[in-house]
Structure formats: structure tokens, C-alpha cells
């Protein structure tokens, strides 16, 4: 959509760089403990709600790069720099951007955007879209009224479509040297707003689509089996297709969502999916990363070279240590697999007591399912339990039905009606395509979550179900994933990644969702965040105290997030962050070393508290 991609050399849009900044610029944030000791560029001094901050440079600040600086940078990256406009700008007469106003209305493009706004792949292929819109501030959604207001919200200001490693290096160097907020985006598949950011420069890595397979890994480490190397932009479905075409078919650990990228935030957060019971997280299968670090250098990270960086990149937090250019992972023999779907909806019963009894019975089998090597994906929302699917990798119909039979016996004894079906496939890949459903983009909600440890599921199940009821009673939705990341992975492998050790003893990882418009009032947003953190997720934490939180799908504003996300690994991750990014070039909310960073002025300016 060319009308939403404005060339940065348009000149007029960059005139705002000369507007005087509020506040006084400093070349050092006063040398306070924990602040950058060798600052790049300048810092902007701000006072907010009684506290002092040193902020990065944003449009309107006199330290914002000049038009000539941007032109020089654009030449460096082959003319791939663009001024950003929101995806829905063609539905509006005027886009009111921080660098100027432009006429954007285009009826045909607006119709296309409106139709495809919920389509994940459509949004992924846009340069800066966030698939879930809450953290964009929802200030420019599709509309039938072109005279409505369209502003940038929390979308980035400019973006770079990186086509070479040199472009990524140049983007990091420019952001670092000018002290700009930097966002790295591949697919925008993120619940927590880490693919967007007010006033930011984005490096988009989605064009890195290279895939190569090898029968023998000859790199660092003891592993010498088959491997796959993927570029930063490769999505799960494309890697799986390539592996499926091998004879005999291969497979790798990926998320349950086919559109997610597999070389960026997924492994840096861990990366769980249907194969986690067998092989652990995607991060556990990593063999090597090629990365660009905060100093702009291209480096290799594996078990022998930059081993501390390699460890940190394996589950230690997204957008924290480096930009991944490519990743190499172990692959495995694909196996015949069987899936079972179960659903209880209002056509089966409108008796909420009966439904909750059925949910209690179902969830009571979480340990049984996981101990038998199954993966279970389910949803609890309003008057509905939807288990879609229960997956038995390497299991026949007879074997899987025998494991699940006690659940059906108990549901039948309860007297609740339900729908169910069972299907067997020649490979897991075929099951994956058929039983795992596409997700929708464009939704606005707060996201939280918690995991249920095995001992809590066995000893405190009544309280866990009461916590589930608290989630639903407060307007929430639950999405569950039953797996244990230590079930099939040998214990000697656990410490080789930065994954929270508690994930090796869980039976259920929950996502909690609280629908809320991104354009809601600040008061309503604060109230909803409090409900999510302290009522919804608070109930889960109290009922399952031995659990943990998964950084890619949890509340970043929960108390003690350092321990919740990484447990005993956090001190080593903090040390790695201080080594590899001492000046805070990279940022994602609630990741190692970001304790002093805040988005002040109502979620806009990224600053460090003094």
C-alpha cells in the first residue's frame, strides 16, 4: 500500500525535527548508579510525577536527527528508510503524524484493509503493524468515516526494511549514536507491544527468508544430527513445509501458531509448542545464532563462541541482548500422530454448575496427560470448554483413546453432553495443518498468564479451579497449554538455556486475556491493568505458588517479574545484559536490566529513572 509508505526524503515530514524540546538536554544522565557510563548521543532531561528522568531522543527534541542526518542514513541503507503511517491510514482523509500531516484517503485500499485487518498474515506482511492492537493505543483503526481522526498512537515513527546484515548494523549504529528508541520487528506476533513503540525507529527483519537444511551438524557442541538454519524472517509454517518435504519427513519445535517467526522473540522467550513435552522449548534445541550486538558487530553465539550470549539468547528475554540474523536448530524425525477434540458449549448445557464440574474433571487430568507425553490446547471462555486438540505424537488412535478414556468415563458419569472426534495422521505436520486453527489479528486486550506446577495441580486443585472461576467472573478468557518442558528433555540439558527452571515441572501454561480497547480512557486502562495483575493473575499465583510466568505470554507489570520469568537464572541474565548492552540500546518491557526504564508521559517517552 504505497499511500501508507511515505519516503523519508519527502522533506516536509521531517521539518518538525527543529521544534524546540521541552526540558534540558544533557550529555550524561548525571552518572547515577546503573545509568549508561558511556552515553551515545544526548539525553533529554524530564521530570514526571515528581521524579527525574533521562530520556531518549524523540521527534520535537533538538537532539532528534536532522533531515540531512536521516538522508545520509537512508543512503547508507540503500533507500529503505520510510516514515511510518498506521495500517488503516488509507481509511482517513488525513494522517496527523508527529513529523507532519499527509492526505491518505484511498477507498480501494481502505476496503482491502478493512477486509483483511483480522488476517494475521496480512498484518505480518505490513512493515510495522502489531498483530494485537492494544499497545498501539488504537488511534487509527479501520473506519467508514474518513473525517475521523487518525494519529500515530504508539506506532513507531520511522522504519527500516533491512535486506542485508549491513542494514541491521547501520540501523543499530544510527539508533545508538543518536540515542533513539529502537524496535526490532519480524512478524509483529506479540501480545505485549514489543513490536511497536512511541517515537521509535524500527528495524524490520522479515525479508530474511533463507532456509537451509543439513544432515549433519558440524558446529559447536556434542550434537551431530540433522539441523535447520533459518533467517530472521522465517515463519514456522515455512520451516515446517521445508522439513516435511525431506524424505523421510523431519520436524522441529515450534509454537502452536503457524505464523509466528522462529528466529527472534520466540527462542529468546523460550518457544513452547506441541513438541515441548518431547524435546523441550525451541530454545533448548538451538545450536547457533548469528547476531548483531549493540556495538553493531556481527557475531556468532554457540556453546564455544560467546557462550554466555548463546545461553542468554536461549530464553533470556526478547530484544535484550542482540538482533538475531539467523538461527540453527536441531530437527527430529516426524511421527504419525493422533488428535482428539472435545467441546462443551451452550448447546450441550446451560447449567454453569455442571459446566464447571466438567472443567474441574478435565483439568484434574492435566498431570495424567502430561505424564503420558500428551500436549493439550484448550480454551475456557464464558459458557464454553473447548479442547482443540489433545495431541498424541507418535501414538495410534487406540493408544491415545486409552489414555483419554478415564476423562470420558468421568464426563459420562457426570451426565454432561459433549462433542468429540478423533483423527490419526501419517505425520505430526499433517495434524498440525488440520487441527491447529488460525488466530485472528487486530484484537485489543491485556494479556497475562501463569503456569501450574505439578505439585500444585496435585495438592491444590480445588483452589486452582476457584482461580479459574475468578478469571471468568472478571471478564477474562483463559487459553491453556498442557505440557512439561522437562518431560522428555534430559535433565543434563536443562541448565544449558536461560529458561526458568520451574518450567521443567509444570503441567499447564495459561494465557489470561482481558479484552479492552486500546483507545479506552487512562482511568479505564489503569483499572483493567489492576484487575489483570492483582485479581485475575493474582488468583492464579495464589493458587499455584510453585508456578512461573512465560515472558512472551504474561503480564509484564506483575510484581517480582524477574523471578516470575526467570527464577534463579535472573542474576546471570542481568550480568549478561550489562556486558552485551550496557547502554540500553535494546528495550522490551520487563526484560533483564530494564528495572529503571519507564515509558513516562502516559506510555510515550522511553526514559531511565534517575
Image (cartoon, grey):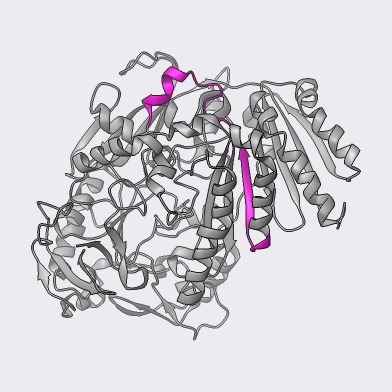
Is 348 or 233 nearer to us in this picture?
Answer: 348
In the depicted structure, whether residue 124 falls above or below residue 517: above
Q: Classify residue 85 by image quadrant.
A: bottom left
Q: Position of residue 480 (x, y in %)?
A: 63, 44
Q: Quadrant location of the N terminus?
A: bottom left
In the depicted structure, whether residue 160 falls above or below residue 574: below
Q: Residue at x 86, y 58 (%)?
A: 350
- Mark yes or no: residue 509 visible: yes
Is 459 or 324 nearer to us in this picture?
Answer: 459
Q: Is residue 495 magenta?
A: yes
Q: Is residue 11 magenta?
A: no
Q: Residue at x 38, y 66 (%)?
A: 155
Q: Position of residue 376 (x, y in %)?
A: 66, 36
Residue 180 located left or right of residue 386:
left
Residue 184 located left or right of residue 412:
left
Q: Classify residue 215 by image quadrant.
A: top left
Q: Residue at x 19, y 62 (%)?
A: 610
Outermost residue toward the bottom in this view = 147
Is 2 or 21 nearer to us in this picture?
Answer: 21
Q: Position of residue 381 (x, y in %)?
A: 70, 55
Q: Position of residue 199 (x, y in %)?
A: 30, 67
Bounds of the magenta span? 473-497
- Mark yes or no: residue 210 visible: no
Residue 71 located left or right of residue 327:
left
Q: How many marks?
A: 0
Amino acid at each position: 500500500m504505497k499511500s501508507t509508505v511515505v519516503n523519508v526524503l519527502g522533506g516536509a515530514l521531517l521539518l518538525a525535527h527543529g521544534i524546540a524540546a521541552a526540558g534540558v538536554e544533557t550529555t550524561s544522565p548525571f552518572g547515577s548508579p546503573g545509568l549508561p557510563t558511556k552515553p551515545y548521543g544526548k539525553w533529554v532531561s524530564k521530570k514526571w510525577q515528581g521524579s527525574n528522568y533521562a530520556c531518549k531522543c524523540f521527534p520535537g527534541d533538538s537532539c532528534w536527527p536532522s533531515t540531512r542526518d536521516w538522508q545520509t542514513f537512508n543512503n547508507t541503507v540503500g533507500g529503505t528508510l520510510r516514515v511510518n503511517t498506521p495500517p488503516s491510514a488509507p481509511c482517513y482523509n488525513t494522517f496527523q503524524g508527529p513529523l507532519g500531516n499527509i492526505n491518505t484517503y484511498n477507498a480501494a485500499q481502505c476496503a482491502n484493509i478493512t477486509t483483511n485487518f483480522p488476517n494475521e498474515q496480512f498484518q505480518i506482511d505490513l512493515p510495522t503493524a502489531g498483530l494485537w492492537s492494544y499497545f498501539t493505543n488504537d488511534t487509527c483503526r479501520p473506519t467508514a468515516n474518513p473525517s475521523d481522526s487518525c494519529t500515530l498512537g504508539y506506532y513507531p515513527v520511522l522504519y527500516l526494511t533491512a535486506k542485508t546484515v549491513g542494514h541491521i548494523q547501520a540501523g543499530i549504529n544510527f539508533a545508538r549514536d543518536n540515542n533513539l528508541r529502537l524496535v526490532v520487528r519480524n512478524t509483529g506476533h506479540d501480545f505485549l507491544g514489543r513490536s511497536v513503540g512511541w517515537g521509535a525507529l524500527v528495524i524490520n527483519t522479515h525479508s530474511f527468508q533463507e532456509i537451509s537444511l543439513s544432515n549433519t551438524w558440524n558446529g559447536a557442541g556434542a550434537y551431530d544430527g540433522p539441523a535447520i538454519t533459518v533467517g530472521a524472517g522465517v515463519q514456522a509454517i515455512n520451516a515446517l513445509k521445508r522439513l516435511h518435504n525431506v524424505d523421510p519427513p523431519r520436524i522441529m519445535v515450534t509454537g502452536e501458531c503457524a505464523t509466528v517467526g522462529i528466529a527472534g522473540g520466540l527462542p529468546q522467550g523460550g518457544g513452547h509448542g506441541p513438541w515441548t513435552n518431547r524435546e523441550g522449548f525451541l530454545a533448548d534445541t538451538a545450536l547457533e545464532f548469528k547476531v548483531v550486538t549493540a556495538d553493531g558487530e556481527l557475531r556468532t553465539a554457540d556453546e564455544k563462541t560467546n557462550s554466555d550470549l548463546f545461553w542468554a539468547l536461549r530464553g533470556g528475554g526478547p530484544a535484550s541482548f542482540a538482533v538475531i540474523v539467523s538461527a540453527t536448530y536441531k530437527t527430529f524425525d516426524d511421527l504419525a500422530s493422533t488428535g482428539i477434540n472435545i467441546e462443551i458449549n451452550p448447546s450441550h448445557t446451560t447449567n454453569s454448575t455442571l459446566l464447571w464440574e466438567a472443567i474441574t474433571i478435565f483439568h484434574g487430568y492435566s498431570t495424567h496427560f502430561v505424564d503420558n507425553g500428551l500436549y493439550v490446547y484448550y480454551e475456557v471462555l464464558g459458557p464454553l470448554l473447548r479442547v482443540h486438540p489433545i495431541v498424541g505424537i507418535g501414538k495410534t488412535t487406540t493408544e491415545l483413546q486409552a489414555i483419554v478414556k478415564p476423562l470420558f468415563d468421568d464426563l459420562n458419569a457426570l451426565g454432561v453432553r459433549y462433542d468429540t472426534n478423533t483423527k490419526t495422521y501419517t505425520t505430526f505436520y499433517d495434524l498440525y495443518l488440520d487441527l491447529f486453527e488460525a488466530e485472528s489479528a487486530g484484537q485489543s486486550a491485556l494479556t497475562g498468564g501463569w503456569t501450574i506446577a505439578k505439585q500444585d495441580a496435585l495438592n491444590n486443585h480445588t483452589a486452582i479451579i476457584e482461580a479459574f472461576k475468578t478469571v471468568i467472573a472478571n471478564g477474562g478468557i483463559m487459553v491453556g497449554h498442557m505440557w512439561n518442558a522437562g518431560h522428555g528433555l534430559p535433565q543434563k540439558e536443562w541448565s544449558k538455556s536461560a529458561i526458568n527452571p520451574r518450567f521443567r515441572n509444570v503441567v499447564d501454561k495459561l494465557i489470561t486475556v482481558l479484552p479492552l480497547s486500546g483507545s479506552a480512557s487512562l482511568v479505564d486502562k489503569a483499572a483493567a491493568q489492576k484487575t489483570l495483575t492483582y485479581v485475575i493473575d493474582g488468583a492464579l499465583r495464589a493458587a499455584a505458588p510453585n508456578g512461573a510466568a512465560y515472558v512472551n505470554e504474561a503480564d509484564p507489570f506483575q510484581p517480582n517479574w524477574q523471578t516470575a520469568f526467570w527464577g534463579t537464572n535472573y542474576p546471570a541474565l542481568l550480568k549478561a545484559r550489562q556486558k552485551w548492552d550496557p547502554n540500553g540500546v535494546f528495550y522490551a518491557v520487563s526484560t533483564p536490566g530494564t528495572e529503571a526504564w519507564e515509558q513516562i508521559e502516559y506510555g510515550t517517552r522511553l526514559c531511565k529513572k534517575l
